[in-house]
Image (cartoon, rainbow, N blue to C red):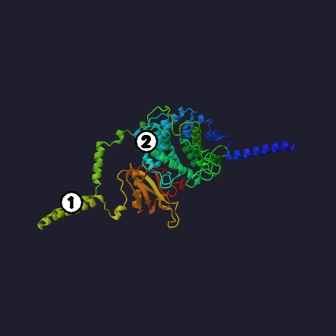
Amino acid sequence: MSFGKLGQRFLCVLLSALCAFAAIHAGFTGSAEEASNQYEEGILSYLTGSSSAESVQAWLDGPEEELFRHPVEWYFLPLYQSGKYDFTLFASAYKSRIPTADSKMANSTWLNRMMTAWALGADVPAEEIKAHIVPGDIMSLVYGLHFANNTGVLYFSPSELFKLQCEDGGFSLRGDVGDVDVTAMTLQALTPLVTGQSRLSLSEEEKKSIAETVERATDYLARAQLDNGGFQSFGADNCESTCQVIIALCGLGIDPATDSRFQKNGENPLTTLRRFRTADGAFIHKEGDAPADITAAETLCALTAYERMLAGQSSLYMLTRSLLMEFDVEELTPTPEALTPTQTEKSEAKTEAKNSIPRYRFYVTGAVIVLLLIALAVLKGLKRFTKKNVLLSVGMAAVLLIITWFTRFESVEKHYSGTEKTNPIGEVTITIRCDTIAGEQGDPADPVILPVTGVQIEKGETAFAVLEQITKENRIPMDFTGSGNSVYVKGIAGLYEFDYGNLSGWIYLINGEEMSIGCGAAEVSPGDRIEFLYTKMLGDDLRGTE
């Protein structure tokens, strides 16, 4: 064999080795589109394998106990958008998944499930959607805007989202520092308004404001990208954050595989997914973790969004509605008549409110009026009944009445005394803990501020009402703002929000479930387990712990 032929063969082997190395490094062979298809096949194989179904269609048509064991809304979105599957039996089964009037869940969860039901043909009253969109609750605003983009009904002003943008251009659940996940998910809702896919009609001024908001948020994501091409949230370089960014970029028509802003050291959001892929096609939250169903589902969403962008189709959350459901969601929600108090209830409420007014206010009011009359008589007798003196006397009387009626005076013993329940319906338990900071400098070593304690409740009481009662009875300082549904707990036992960073504060759980609705809106039932916990990372440092 000549040296020439030997050299050619050596070069062929060398090139083959380099190609193989590149394939291993990238985690796939061929183009980014082929990689997306390869990853998608692996996720679907993982889904059917973990559910013991012969195919994806068999899983969709399978029993509810197996179907809803998975994060079904996350899987539904990409599977539905693929147009490859029949959702007739799925729609029938999903009826049991739709929240009823007395369901306890976060507003964003309610909206997410209702959007799935809407896509399958259910009618969702606009009033119900509006009732679950809460200003300041960014995730309910995000899902509410997804609804608006699809239905063409403006449930709230987009400015409610604009004013939540942080100075760095990002968005977060709370605080003034952007978070990658929240920013990407907010972008996903805003981009149809920029690309013209939304069914909403907005003014040119509103469109301009949205475009500026989107540009700042996109720049934030580019700055937040890690040197390895991925993204992190709550300090963890993870797969889901990268997936949410991919979905957001694809919605804007930005190719994450080629756009120069998102190329770092030869890596980009798509290639970095290989770091989270297992040998069997599943995906993990972060390196070293076990495969996670929700991670696989979110990755499938990202891959589908990428494929739709390449095909020139609409963004992931712009849905083509089917007509598979045969009922109106209004059947599951209270009618306006049911929500309107009867005349008897109004009368009883007025009587109760009147009886709740402290008697001393009436006594003091009478005394002030008598003193005012005496003062005026004295002024007249002293021949000092001038306009100036009369106005001064009346003004002083008015100040006393304002103080009397707008200040509640009570003894320390009464303030900290227990609240007697006239019509108790059962008992809940409540505990207050600060495990995340216990033992740190300046804080007590004992993380238990209040051990598990039973509290009698009446119908309609909320988690905040229970907290307010139990802190009073145990003389635990508690500070809050707002009232009713919008009440917000700022501090307990001298431990306040932001004491340990921009993401620190108090969250509450009911039966182990973290809820985004205010604790003043979450009604409790007998047997419920309420926990108020201090977090330094918006609850991420508490997940997986009791």
- Among numbered discs 2 and 1, the one appearing first in the sequence: 2
Residue 63 image point, x, y percent: 56, 36
Residue 313 image point, x, y percent: 55, 36
Between 521 and 455, the residue placed more toward the observer is 521
Between 148 and 73, the residue placed more toward the observer is 148
Residue visible at 47% across and 59% down in the picture: 498
**For residue 73, side relative to residue 277 (left or right):** left
Badge 1 is on which residue? 366
Q: In this view, does 122 lie above or below 232?
A: above
Element carrying mark 2:
helix
Q: Would you identify the image quadrant in which residue 494 lies?
A: bottom left
Q: Work out which quarter of the rendered image holds the N terminus and state it.
A: top right
Foreground mark, 2 or 1, reads: 2
Badge 2 is on which residue? 204
Q: Do the residues labelled 2 and 1 touch (CB within 8 Å)?
A: no
Residue 9 image point, x, y percent: 81, 42
Between 224 and 493, the residue placed more toward the observer is 224
The residue type indicated by label 1 comes to: Gly
Q: What is the crowding at mark 2: few (fewer than 14 residues within 10 Å), some, or many (at least 20)? A: few
Q: Can residue 480 be seen in this view?
A: yes
Between 321 and 3, the residue placed more toward the observer is 3
Residue 523 tag number:
none
Q: Is residue 69 visible?
A: no
Q: Is residue 386 above or below residue 185?
A: below
The residue type indicated by label 2 comes to: Glu
